[in-house]
Amino acid sequence: MMIRLLEPCTDPNGVGCTIFEDAATLHLTTTRWYPSSLRIFDGSLMVIGGIHETTSFYNNDSVSSFEFFPPKDNGVARPSAFLERSLPVNLFPRGFSLPDGRVFMIANNQTIIYDIEAKTETILPDIPNGVRVTNPFDGTATLLPLSPPLYTPEILVCGGSNSSDTTPPDQHSSQDPASDQCSRIVVTPEGIQRGWIVERMPEGRVMPEMILLPDGRVLIINGAATGYASIGSVRDPIGNSNADHAVLRPVLYDPNAPLGQRFSNDGLPSSEIARVYHSTVTLTPNGNIFVAGSNPNQNPGVVNNTKFHTEFRAEYLNPPYMSVARPELHNVPATLPFNHTFTVDVTMPPGLEARNVQVALVDLGFSTHAFHSSQRLIFMHALLSPNHDSITITTPPNNRVYPPGPAWIFITVDGITSTGTHVLIGNGQAPPVQDQGIPLKL
C-alpha cells in the first residue's frame, strides 16, 4: 500500500505543487482495503483497520491493527482486540482525536478510547439498541464542535442499521429499514458513566454524512432509507444497489437546542439526485456545501439506464448567507501558533448588530463511505472591537485540542458566515512534532 505525499502548496493552478512517491520506502506495513485514517496530536497520520483485499460485503479477512505515518514502533503495526471483537461489520472504523490526545473509535456497535502513548484500549458503552454504524451497515458520526475553556468532547452517531451481523448477505434485503437513531455521549468520566443519550432523526438513513457548519450546527445529508452499503450482495438489489429509497432532503441538527428540539429541515430544499453508495459531501472554503457522487455499481463502474446509475452531476447547497453581504476577515497571518492572541481587521456589512459573533477554526477533513475523517471545528475566543472594525482572537491552547496542520477560519456574525481564510496551525514542522502551547486546565 504505497503512500503519496503532496508537498504543501497554495497555487490554485498547481504551479510549484509536488507529488512525491517511492514504493520502496513510502508504504504501509500491510495491504489495507477500506481502512480509516485521522490526523493525531503530533501531526502524524493514524491508520485504523481495514481488510487485506476487497470484499463483497462483510470484513472476512480483517487487518485488526493500527499503524502510523510517519511510522512509529519501528514500523510494526499495533494489534487491536477492539477490531477483532467488532467483526464482521467494522470496515471504515470511525475515529476522532480527543482534546487530550487519545482517540475515540467506533466499529460495528462498539466503542473504545485508544491511548496512543500508553497503547491501551478502554471499552466504552455500546451504541444503544443494537444499532451498527460501520460499513457495510453505514451510519455516520462526528466529534461535535469544541468550545473554550474546557473543550469538552461529545460524539454524535446517526443512522446505520439494526440488522444482525450474523445474517448472510444474501438474506439481507434492500428494503430493510435504516435506523433513525442518533446517539450522543459526553466523553468525560461522568458522561461515560451516564452513557449514550438517544435521539431520533425525522427519517432513517443508511450511508448519510454529517458536516460541521461554521455556526456549530450539523448538516445531515445523503443516504438511503432502506438497505445497506456495498454492491450487489443482498437478495434483492436495485440494479446493483444494496440500498433503496434515497433520502433527498437534508436535515439540520443543533447541538445546543433542548433534547427533542434539535432536528429541523425547515427551509431546506430536496435534491432530485439520489446520493447513495460512493457519494460524498464537504463544506467548501466559500462556506457552502458541495455534494457529488453516487455509484452503487460493479467495476468498471459506469452504469446507465438503472435507478441508481453512475452519477456525474455535482450540486451546491447554498445557505441563505450566500446571497447577502457577508463579514470579511483581513490580514490574517498565514501561520498561527497555539495559545496565541492576535488581532485582525474585519469588514462588517451594514445592518449587522454583531450581537452574536463566533469565530470557528475548521478542518474540512475528507470524505469516504459515509464518514468525514479528521473533520473538526474549534470555536476560538474572540472579542470584537467597539467600532466593529477589528477582532481579537485566541488560537486553541495546544496541539491536542487541534492537531497541528491546515485549517480554515470562519467568522459568523448574527448568523451570517464569511468565506474561510486558510491558515496553518502550529510550528509548521514535519510530524511527529513535540507538544506545543499550554496544557488544558482540568
Image (spheres, grey):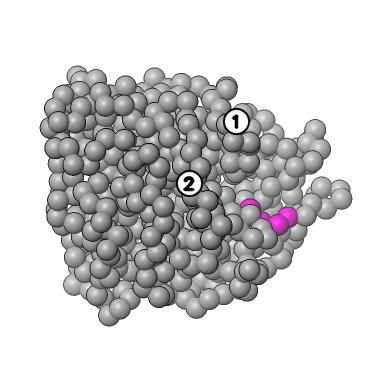
Residue shown at 40%/42% (left/top)? 128
Which quadrant holds the C terminus? bottom right
Residue 153 falls inside the magenta stretch: no
Q: Is residue 301 left or right of residue 427?
A: left
Residue 353, x across and y down, in percent: 81, 38
Instruction: Tell me the tag on residue 2.
Output: none
Q: Is residue 22 visible?
A: no
Image quadrant where residue 81 sits: bottom left
As drawn, the residue found furthest toward the bottom would be: 74
As drawn, the residue found furthest toward the front would be: 193
Kind of residue indicated by mark 2: Trp
Q: Which residues are magenta?
A: 378-382
Kind of residue indicated by mark 1: Gln
Residue 379 falls inside the magenta stretch: yes
Image quadrant where residue 332 sits: bottom right
Residue 299, x across and y down, in percent: 14, 38
Residue 15, x across and y down, in percent: 41, 57
Compared to residue 55, the image places residue 15 above or below, namely below
In 3D space, how far apart are the residues under numbered discs 1 and 2 (Cα atoms)? 17 Å
Classify mark 2: helix, strand or loop. loop
Binning the other alpha carbons within 10 Å of mark 2 as few (below 14), some (14 to 19) or many (20 upward) gives: many
Instruction: Tell me the tag on residue 261.
Output: 1
